[in-house]
Image (spheres, rainbow, N blue to C red):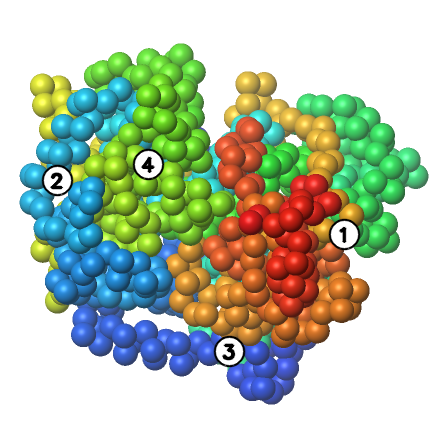
Amino acid sequence: MSNVTKKDPKKGTLHSGPTSISKIPAPKHWVSPVPFGLGKIKPKHIRDTMKVAWENKDNLKYATNILTKGVCDGCALGVSGLYDQTLKGPHICTTRLNVLRLSTMPPLKEEIVHADVDRLRQYSSAELRKMGRIPYPLIRRKGENKFSRISWDGAMDMIAEKMKTLDPKQYAFYLTSRGITNESYYTAGKVARFLGTNHVDNASRICHSPSKTALKRSVGIGASSCTYKDWIGTDVLVFWGSVASNASPVSTKYMLAAKKKGTKIIVINPYKEPAMDKYWVPSNAESALFGTQVADDFYQVNIGGDIAFMHGIMKYWFEMEEEQYGSAINHAFVQDHVNGYEELKTKVDELSWEKIIHSSGMSKERIRELAELLANSKNAVFAWALGLTMHSFATDNISQVANLALLRGYLGRENAGLMPFRGHSSVQGTGEMGADPFVLPGGGWDEDNVKRIEELWGFDLPKWQGDIVGVNLEHAALPDDHEKKLKLYYMSGGNFLETMPNPEFIEKALSEVDIRVHQDIILNTSTLVDAKEAVIVLPAKTRFEQEGGGTSTSTERMVYFSPEIAGNKQPVEEARAEWKIYVDLAKRVKPETAHLVNFETAQEIRDEIAKANPDYDGIQHLKKQGDVFQWGGAWLCEDGVCPTPDGRGNLIPIDIPNLEKPEGTFYVTTRRGKQFNSMVFKETDPFNNAGRYDVLLNAEDANTLNIVEGEGIVVYNQHGVFQGKALFTDIARGNIGLHFPEGNFLIPKGIYDSPSGIPQYSVAVKIEKAERFNARKDIDYLEKKLEDDEIDAPV
């Protein structure tokens, strides 16, 4: 890519390639003149990097090749080798380094593989992960307490024979975001439909499915409308419920470049996340020495209060408009490109300031500050993450963000746009490849797209609606004779015990299927759960071992080629490329027609992807290290023209949700520490010294409960009990933070955002001193039901 902006007749303006970060020192952005943040609570990047090098010393050359030649299998920024399309210069981060060992470590030793399963259950997933990769196919039948070795033929035949006995509605597929390539997602989605099931889902269901659903209805797209480069030079960059610096550390370099160009960074989050406040960017000398003051301001809304907060911004804009036409609303853009203005204005006008302030937890003055900043800003980029998406009203959250962008015309041009900030490599590609119950490659289940895919694939698609992962798990727990009973679950990666709400139920559900297949590179706690007939474990190759290479799609729609990397000194000889395993399964279940899903090479898959999803026309030409293209061009909805039926964006009136938060309760949210999804790398968060079982609590709230910092406290509701220690932090009053997944025991199952199917991860709880809770429980808990209606602690 050159630095000259070009236009393509089909894609529009093309990305102009990486830019340079200013080398002129900017002391006004420094955290402190004291070098290296001495005396401050912060990550020790150099020390951590040395630890990673030592950890990989037995396979160091291969590890180096992965870092310098492969596409990052950590976050979704899309760093290829050490370079990306946003900023010139090398980039590397601790997230990428922490997952590196998954690709370089040796196979598990036999004494571990075949140890008593009760012994293995004493280990955490982090401990199991460090022991090594799955060496060969394994099976543990009902009643057996150890895994036994099984041949690939034996394992695949057993799965296939079971599928032949089942109705296709009784088996399901799931794919995580663990470095899986577009080629594997595409093949899995195709094979699932070939085998007659639409029960195929992916990891975006529990992170960004509401983003796609909301953006589709608001502006007709299912991905970021802009690029990371648009951060650099925009007037305002707003992060909603996102700790981008922790999830994707290289993004802090983009933020630094933006600040040096005059961008104001605003963070909207209940907890003043330290990583979004101050950061020492290790690959930038100035920031590594003196740190970077990242956020210019924090707006600490209530958990679940974002919709009300955004209503407040719009309400103030409409009040500004009464004083002076055009002072807040981009009327030219709205008139030419937007539907629903009057309906939205009516909805906002009906809301009282009292209701907005109560729900959001923000004062009118603070709301006005941000409203005026945005009204006076020509450009803005709105980015968001799980703080907006993990709610039962998540789709409405995102459509409300889109409402703000449409009213101001922040869409379809440079330095403006809507960005769902993805956390995992290639998770953007899952739905675009069709590994999703609601979509097919290149579109949805509309008659034209179904016909097009059937003609391309050569077989009829099942026409019934597939279930999302949460519903699949609920159906696994149904009685055997129930028509919706799930009897076989085939999972590529993932650990539902540590990602889904209500882990106790999840364990029961996983144990209730007849056969459970874990196609993975490592063992985790869910692998050790029993099944009615058998648990089968299949060793998968990493993306760097995939024959013919593989591709992944970043947040900004860049499709990167990651080559096969030779030289692994500790290979898993029996591991297979994930897409090859799916093809093998299809051949065994339906051998007479399996030629319809047969792929011999990864290149054949890319050739077909280009036909199946027209946006991906170009993927077939990616063949070597560094090859990349961006589907859709630099900006979707360019010049305000949306891919909706009428070419216009849609303003959607949104109701303020009822959080059902009884008096005297707190709202809880889960957060990440030093971890990658559920994979924990440190027990203590280096940004705030919080332990995994610390409860992040406002000091004033603690004072009203006579709680002192560091003492034992109990957080409880009708779903579960969490015992931890009080840690006083800068979090909005009435809200508390727990680590994910430790806090998932408090989250109920079966509550979803209805448009997108994401589970809810926030809930009302009560807090007590541990000594008082336990004494009260001893005295009268079993004698009578406490008068707390919906937040009783369970027996």
Which residue is labeled 3 in the image?
288
Any part of residue 394 in sight? yes
Q: Is residue 381 visible?
A: no
Mark 3 or 1, closer to the camera: 1
Q: Nearer the viewer, mark 1 or mark 2?
A: 1
**Secondary structure state at the residue bearing disc 2:** helix
Type of amino acid under label 2: Ala
Report the mark closest to the observer, 4 or 3. Answer: 4
User: On residue 155, which mark appears?
Assistant: 2
The residue under label 1 is 664
In the image, is residue 611 above or below residue 509?
above
Callout 1: SS: loop
When the figure is inspected, residue 289 is found, relative to residue 749, above or below; the finding is: below
| Real-space CA distance between mark 3 and mark 1, rounded to the nearest whole angstrom | 44 Å
Marks 4/2: CA–CA distance: 20 Å
* First along the sequence among labels 4 and 2: 2
Task: Look at discs 3 and 2 and give the one toward the viewer.
Answer: 2
Give the percent coordinates (x, y) of residue 419.
Answer: 55, 45
Q: Which mark is residue 512?
A: 4
Marks 1 and 4, the one that precedes in the sequence: 4
Residue 338 to residue 57: above or below = above
Mark 1 neighbour class, 10 Å CA radius: few under 14, some 14 to 19, many 20 or more: few
